[in-house]
Image (cartoon, rainbow, N blue to C red):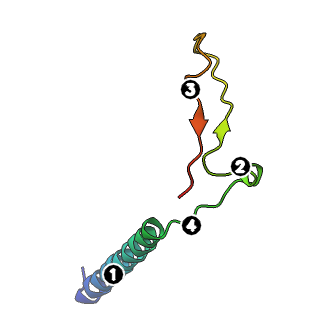
């Protein structure tokens, strides 16, 4: 193999390696920014539900006669 082809191959490999590292760095920075600044969007059907309200939850697999267990309380932070 000619030295010119080896040089072209090494330069191409270095370019792909460099672009991969930059892409990984940008994706990790974006991911960490999302984790540190959570901007959770409220579902349109939950817009009228206030923090602390109880919701009715239906679970078909449980056969419990007690009505007080399993209440879900919404807490928004």
Q: Is residue 67 above or below residue 51?
A: above
| Quadrant including the N terminus | bottom left
The residue identified by callout 2 is 49
Between disc 4 and disc 3, whose residue precedes? 4
Measured in 3D between alpha carbons, the distance from the residue under mark 3 to the one under mark 2, in whole angstroms, is 18 Å
Measured in 3D between alpha carbons, the distance from the residue under mark 1 to the one under mark 4, in whole angstroms, is 32 Å
Between disc 4 and disc 2, whose residue precedes? 4
Q: Nearer the viewer, mark 1 or mark 4?
A: 4
Q: Is residue 48 above or below residue 34?
A: above
Which residue is at a point 58% across and 61% down the rendered structure image? 40
Which residue is at a point 32% across and 76% down the rendered structure image? 17
As helix, strand or loop, the secondary structure at mark 1 comes to: helix
Which residue is at a point 33% across and 81% down the rendered structure image? 18
Which of these two is toward me, 46 or 35? 46
Between disc 3 and disc 2, whose residue precedes? 2
Taking the image as shown, residue 3 lies to the left or right of residue 34, namely left
As helix, strand or loop, the secondary structure at mark 3 comes to: loop
> Percent from the top left, x then y, of residue 25?
36, 76
Which residue is at a point 59% across and 35% down the rendered structure image? 72
Residue 51: mark: none
> Percent from the top left, x then y, of residue 16?
37, 77
Q: Are marks 1 and 4 in contact (CB under 8 Å)?
A: no
The residue identified by callout 1 is 18
As helix, strand or loop, the secondary structure at mark 4 comes to: loop
> Percent from the top left, x then y, of residue 54?
64, 38
């Amino acid at each position: 193999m000619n030295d010119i082809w080896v040089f072209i191959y090494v330069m191409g490999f270095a370019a792909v390696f460099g672009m991969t590292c930059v892409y990984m760095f940008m994706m990790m920075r974006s991911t960490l920014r999302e984790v540190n600044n959570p901007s959770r969007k409220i579902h349109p059907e939950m817009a009228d539900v206030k923090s602390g309200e109880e919701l009715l939850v239906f679970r078909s697999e449980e056969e419990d006669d007690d009505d007080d267990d399993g209440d879900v309380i919404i807490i928004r932070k």
